Image (spheres, rainbow, N blue to C red):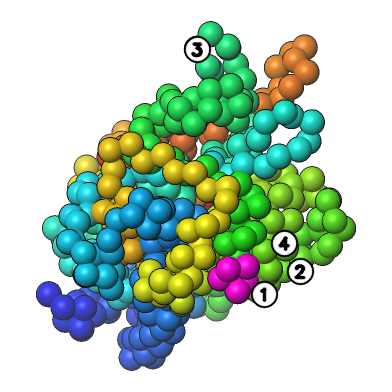
């Protein structure tokens, strides 16, 4: 496969995947961009991997998870947690606000936990592959997921009991 | 169910994905820019600068070997050694109240089997190490007490990697080499004030003379992380050396090589390795393929002790050393981009 073919067929999926990891369009763009530049410059090595797409996604996760990275992640720290859900006083809108609530709680999770959730519920990967992508043991990966779910449930309850938003 | 909500949330936000065409253009532009920077130094980024100290290929001619066709000569080509290679670089300084030279810079240079890159792994001279029969000492005591072989063994005990070759380079030699190359373009992330001469070297990239490089490379007192920052400076100087040697296509410039050959203060210990083969291996590495690694360390002060030691992060160092042994540094760097020296 050439780099061109790879980009033609996979860039869309990678861009969506980056949104799931970072939670917003701009950071996602930076993440894809930085990763794909490295992919392009090292294409031979990427192409040699058994599954190039998986390899690239793993590069992206590493880039995203490592908190001491360069400039683009620092920008994330400066941004508010997530986009505020706009509350409009009709049932329909209340429902969509509830939905975005999950998205904003996701933004408060540690990166590894969020990455684990993306791999499980967006990519639908089995635990073993999630662990491989995160470079940890299966037990640790499961731990990330269950901790993240607990936190999501707790926050969701708290917020909906509060009844605001 | 929260799981279903999650799937829903992910699916709903797919539409937030950045637009593909501009994204693609941005990637191509950025990659082109970085590639240009890379090819600029491609011409032989010679011998990781010549083995990062110039020492190795330079010594070729001292051994009266003929230059092979690949390097512009007419002699019989020598096969480059296969498999990963590890070179140990000892930067020596004099003075400071010790009788002999001290190994202030200790760096393991790892060349993976695929030959495209070189990794610089600094070992802080204040790192605690056990020398059989001596107990716990600072790492550079291994050189003070046991010479080249002592240092080589200490590195092997620490990392499990046995250096295939060792280069001892006096700081003064670094100065001579710098001048012979017409100065080095060193990039500093922060300004450095010399404890020895009071000179200030500003942040950013600029050309340095031999005297300046020597002064710069010695500084640790006024730097935030002391000797660790000095190790990083050392890596930066080697990078500059690699770029400069690459730009000048060092290996094809016999006049310059002849001059460098006479640099006093560089000693090489290569054991069974053919220098010529080694130089050929090094010649495949581009300056852009040189990766400086700077891992986290802790200061350990033991109760009642008068000296404090450094210790590597027990969560990182074993992985790094395993990657050096297994020749999987590429994966290590992918997983720990934060430890890569930023240009």
Instruction: Say which chain tag 3 marks.
Output: B
Q: CA distance from mark 2 to mark 1?
A: 9 Å
State whether residue A119 is above or below residue B160.
below
- Left or right: where does residue B22 sit relative to residue A132? right
Judge by depth and name the residue closer to the eye, B109 or B321.
Answer: B109
Which secondary structure lies at badge 2?
Answer: loop
Q: CA distance from mark 1 to mark 4?
A: 14 Å
- Residue A81 image-quadrant placement: bottom right
> Does residue A109 appear in this view?
no
* Disc 3 with disc 1 on a shared chain: yes
> Does residue B77 appear in this view?
yes
Give the magenta part as a residue range: B179-183
The mark nearer the N terminus, 1 or 4, is 1
- Name the residue beneath numbered marker 1: B206
Q: Residue furthest front?
A: B64
Residue B332 image position (x, y, % from top left): 37, 48
- Name the residue beneath numbered marker 3: B132
Do residues under tags 2 and 1 come within 8 Å of each other at their CB atoms? yes
Residue at 61% across / 37% down in the picture? B103
Q: CA distance from mark 2 to mark 4?
A: 16 Å
- Name the residue beneath numbered marker 2: B202
- Residue B72 image-quadrant placement: bottom left
Label 4 crowding class (10 Å Cα cut-off): few <14, some 14-19, many 20+? some
- Name the residue beneath numbered marker 4: B211
């Amino acid at each position: 496969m050439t780099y061109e073919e790879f980009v033609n067929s996979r860039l869309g999926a990678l861009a969506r995947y980056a949104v799931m990891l970072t939670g917003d369009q701009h950071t996602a763009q930076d993440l894809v961009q930085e990763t794909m530049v490295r992919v392009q410059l090292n294409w031979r090595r990427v192409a040699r991997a058994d599954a190039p797409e998986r390899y690239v996604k793993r590069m992206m996760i590493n880039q995203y998870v490592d908190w001491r990275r360069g400039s683009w992640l620092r920008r994330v720290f400066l941004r508010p947690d997530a986009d505020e859900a706009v509350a409009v006083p009709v049932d329909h809108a209340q429902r969509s606000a509830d939905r975005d609530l999950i998205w904003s709680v996701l933004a408060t999770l540690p990166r590894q936990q969020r990455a684990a959730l993306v791999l499980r519920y967006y990519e639908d990967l089995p635990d073993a592959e999630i662990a491989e992508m995160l470079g940890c043991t299966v037990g640790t990966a499961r731990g990330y997921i269950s901790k993240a779910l607990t936190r999501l449930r707790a926050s969701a309850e708290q917020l909906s009991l509060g009844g605001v938003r | 169910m929260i799981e279903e909500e999650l799937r829903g949330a992910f699916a709903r936000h797919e539409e937030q994905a950045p637009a593909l065409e501009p994204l693609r253009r941005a990637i191509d532009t950025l990659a082109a820019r970085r590639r240009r920077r890379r090819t600029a130094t491609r011409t032989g980024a010679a011998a990781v600068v010549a083995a990062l100290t110039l020492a190795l290929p330079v010594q070729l001619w001292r051994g009266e070997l003929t230059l092979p066709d690949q390097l512009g000569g007419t002699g019989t080509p020598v096969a480059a050694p296969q498999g990963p290679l590890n070179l140990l670089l000892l930067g020596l300084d004099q003075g400071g109240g010790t009788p002999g030279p001290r190994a202030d810079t200790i760096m393991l240079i790892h060349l993976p089997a695929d030959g495209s890159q070189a990794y610089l792994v600094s070992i802080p001279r204040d790192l605690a190490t056990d020398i059989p029969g001596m107990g716990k000492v600072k790492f550079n005591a291994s050189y003070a007490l046991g010479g080249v072989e002592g240092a080589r063994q200490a590195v092997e005990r620490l990392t499990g990697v046995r250096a295939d070759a060792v280069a001892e380079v006096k700081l003064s030699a670094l100065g001579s080499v710098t001048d012979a190359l017409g100065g080095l373009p060193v990039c500093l992330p922060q300004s450095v004030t010399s404890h020895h001469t009071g000179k200030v070297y500003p942040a950013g990239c600029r050309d340095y003379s031999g005297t300046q490089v020597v002064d710069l490379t010695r500084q640790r007192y006024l730097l935030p992380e002391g000797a660790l920052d000095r190790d990083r400076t050392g890596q930066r100087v080697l990078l500059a050396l690699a770029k400069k040697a690459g730009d000048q296509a060092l290996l094809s410039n016999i006049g310059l090589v002849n001059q460098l050959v006479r640099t006093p203060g560089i000693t090489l210990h290569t054991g069974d390795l053919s220098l010529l083969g080694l130089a050929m291996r090094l010649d495949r590495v581009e300056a852009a393929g040189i990766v400086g690694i700077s891992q986290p360390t802790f200061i350990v002060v033991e109760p009642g002790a008068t000296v404090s030691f450094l210790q590597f992060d027990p969560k990182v160092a074993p992985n790094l050393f395993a990657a050096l042994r297994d020749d999987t540094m590429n994966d290590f760097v992918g997983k720990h981009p934060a430890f890569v020296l930023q240009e």
